[in-house]
Image: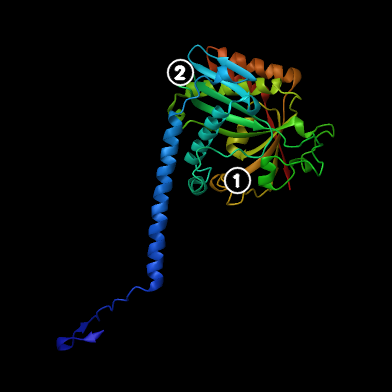
């Protein structure tokens, strides 16, 4: 404070501080970050819009499906192994997956943009089975899930030190079967990992009845495909959030073991590292796959639910009949 006329106090004028070189560098970096963020945002929007327009029309007639159902209203549900899928359709399916994962923030827009990705890269995994519901008129994928097999060149016991891990085991850093006991007779070619359960963004606006119907169709396709695989799957593995993916498994699987206490992550150079950043607590699971008469009954319940006058009542009856249970092991 300084003395003014008649002894009044006057605040001293603030002395402006000139910007430093460090301030200038920070401003330039912030502007560059904003520019790149804008470019990434436009890239994601353009990529999503492009894949919304891409059509898989004709796929059913150009692949070797394990399961296909063409419904009178134009809904087509099919399951096709990677080995029976023409390359251009595989590229379109992987593009759909990338677009939906970017939309959900389950994939890194920085990596996708920096690599100018059009579709997900083909990971080094074993056989993959693509299960999808399509609108036949447009060729648009409505709902999608896949499961992948082992990369072992020869099937190995699940606790064998040379067995190659499934992708979820890599992310969680553990061999699931070191903690979930299974018969010694089970080998790696009898286990499949469930992955990539996604739906087209616009399907969120569909009616509850339509969403339920597509869910039942996908479940039927999934389990009919299990019956077509050789050797027959004995266990399914994967990971998910407790209240979402894992809870849904109890609708159709009786015996599920959840592994507690893992700390999943992927390196920040991995396109899918946000899977373990944006989701809530993600837990791995091992589920006994239904087989034989049990699988036949499950398929029958699903078929009856789909043809019931009230599919919701049929679905509730299915859930009540299966009565899946969750066991837990902590590591």
* Separation of residues labelled 2 and 1 (CA atoms): 39 Å
Query: In the rendering, at what x and y percent does residue 221 appear?
Result: 61, 21
Viewer-side label of 2, 1: 2
Query: In the rendering, at what x and y percent does residue 224 appear?
Result: 66, 20
Residue at position x 68%, y 38% from top? 285
Residue at position x 70%, y 28% from top? 254
From the viewer's perspective, tell me whether residue 294 is left or right of residue 30.
right
Where residue 326 sits, quadrant-wise, is top right
From the viewer's perspective, tell me whether residue 192 is left or right of residue 240.
right
At label 1, counting other C-alpha atoms closer than 10 Å, the crowd grade (few under 14, some 14-19, many 20 or more) is: some
Q: Secondary structure at mark 1?
A: loop
Q: Tell which of 312 and 246 is nearer to you.
A: 246
Residue at the extreme left: 6
**Residue bearing the label numbered 1:** 281
**Would residue 275 be seen by someone viewing this image from the given angle?**
yes
At label 2, counting other C-alpha atoms closer than 10 Å, the crowd grade (few under 14, some 14-19, many 20 or more) is: some
Residue at position x 53%, y 18% from top? 76
Where residue 160 sits, quadrant-wise, is top right
From the viewer's perspective, tell me whether residue 80 is left or right of residue 99.
right
The correct choice, above or below, for 23 with respect to 270 in the image is below
Number of numbered discs overlaid on the protein picture: 2
> Disc 2 or 1, which lies upstream in sequence?
2
The correct choice, above or below, for 277 with respect to 55 in the image is below
Looking at the image, what colour scheme do you see?
rainbow
**Residue bearing the label numbered 2:** 137
**Would residue 313 be seen by someone viewing this image from the given angle?**
no
Residue at the extreme right: 184
């Amino acid at each position: 404070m300084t003395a003014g006329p008649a002894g009044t106090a006057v605040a001293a004028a603030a002395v402006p501080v000139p910007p430093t070189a460090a301030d200038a560098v920070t401003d330039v970096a912030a502007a560059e970050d904003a520019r790149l963020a804008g470019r990434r945002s436009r890239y994601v929007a353009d990529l999503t819009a492009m894949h919304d327009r891409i059509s898989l029309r004709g796929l059913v007639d150009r692949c070797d499906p394990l399961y296909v159902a063409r419904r009178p209203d134009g809904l087509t549900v099919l399951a096709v192994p990677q080995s029976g899928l023409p390359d251009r359709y595989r590229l379109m399916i992987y593009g759909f997956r990338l677009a939906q994962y970017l939309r959900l923030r389950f994939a890194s827009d920085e990596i996708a943009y920096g690599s100018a990705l059009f579709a997900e890269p083909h990971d080094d995994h074993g056989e993959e089975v693509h299960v999808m519901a399509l609108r036949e008129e447009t060729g648009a994928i409505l709902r999608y899930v896949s499961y992948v097999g082992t990369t072992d060149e020869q099937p190995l016991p699940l606790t064998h030190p040379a067995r190659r891990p499934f992708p979820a085991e890599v992310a969680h850093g553990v061999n699931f079967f070191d903690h979930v006991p299974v018969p010694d007779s089970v080998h790696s070619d009898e286990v499949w990992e469930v992955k990539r359960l996604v739906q087209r963004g616009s399907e969120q606006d569909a009616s509850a009845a339509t969403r339920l119907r597509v869910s039942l169709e996908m479940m039927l396709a999934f389990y009919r495909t299990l019956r077509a695989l050789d050797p027959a799957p004995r266990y399914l593995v994967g990971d998910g959030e407790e209240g979402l993916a894992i809870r849904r498994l109890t609708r159709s699987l009786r015996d599920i073991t959840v592994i507690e206490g893992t700390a999943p992550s992927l390196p920040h150079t991995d396109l899918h590292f946000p899977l373990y950043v944006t989701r809530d607590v993600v837990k791995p699971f091992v589920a006994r796959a239904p087989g034989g008469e049990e699988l036949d009954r499950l398929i029958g319940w699903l078929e009856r639910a789909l043809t019931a006058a009230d599919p919701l009542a049929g679905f509730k009856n299915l859930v009540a009949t299966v009565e899946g249970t969750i066991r837990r092991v902590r590591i």
